[in-house]
Amino acid sequence: MKNKIPLLFILSLVIINLLSGSCKKDINSNIPHLLTNGVWELATLQVTNYVGDTQISIDTLNTNCDSTQLFTFNANNTCTYTNFDCLAQTTTGTWTFTANRLYFMSDMVCKDTIAGGAESTTKPFENTQIFNLGTYSMVLQTGDVQPNYSSTKKRRIVRYGFIKRKALIEE
């Protein structure tokens, strides 16, 4: 019996140590750092139209825009977009990641132009897929980016290509 008490004591210490070390760990990810570390300048803007998974058309937009369009993400989950849709405007909002950090949502409301030149408002980054994100480039997709879709339904995907701006120059 005397030999079992120290063994029981050591076994209980091991069990307590295992249980205390099994806490849920935070998701370690460099995505927030890559997103918030600098200012992103719009380089390309493409719209692709599909029916199901068949591509119908692809259009490159903003080819005649002389304004620099900048997207800034802040660590406090606010964001700013300057000159959206080549209109002189600075729009702010908030952003948040989904649990898997592959999508983010933003409540930013921007002025937009529609056919005929009339202005309207839109939430361009309401449901945004992070298609590619690196140290110097980022590609975001918005529109009908859900993973499951009907084979006969029309879909429109807007792809924004950004490059990291070295220094913000007052314009």
Image: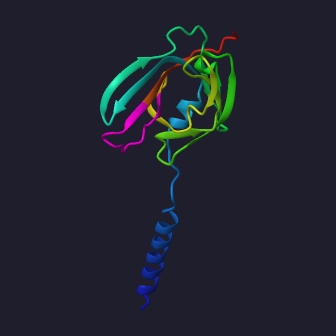
As for residue 142 lying within the magenta part, the answer is: yes
Compared with 115, 151 (above or below) is below
Q: Which residue extends farthest front?
A: 116
Instruction: Measuring from the top left, give residue 12's x and y in whole percent.
Output: 47, 77
In-front residue for pair 125/116:
116
Q: Is the N terminus in the top left, top right, bottom left or bottom right quadrant?
A: bottom left
Give the magenta-colored segment's residue range. 140-156
Residue at x-position 49% and y-position 40%: 103
- Total numbered labels placed on residues in the image: 0
What scheme was used to colour the molecule?
Answer: rainbow
Compared with 132, 58 (above or below) is above
**Left or right: 81 as drawn, with respect to 163:** right
Instruction: Measuring from the top left, give residue 138's x and y in whole percent.
Output: 48, 25
Q: Is the C terminus in the top left, top right, bottom left or bottom right quadrant?
A: top right
Instruction: Measuring from the top left, give residue 137's x and y in whole percent.
Output: 47, 22
Residue at x-position 50% and y-position 44%: 28
Instruction: Measuring from the top left, give residue 13's x and y in whole percent.
Output: 49, 73
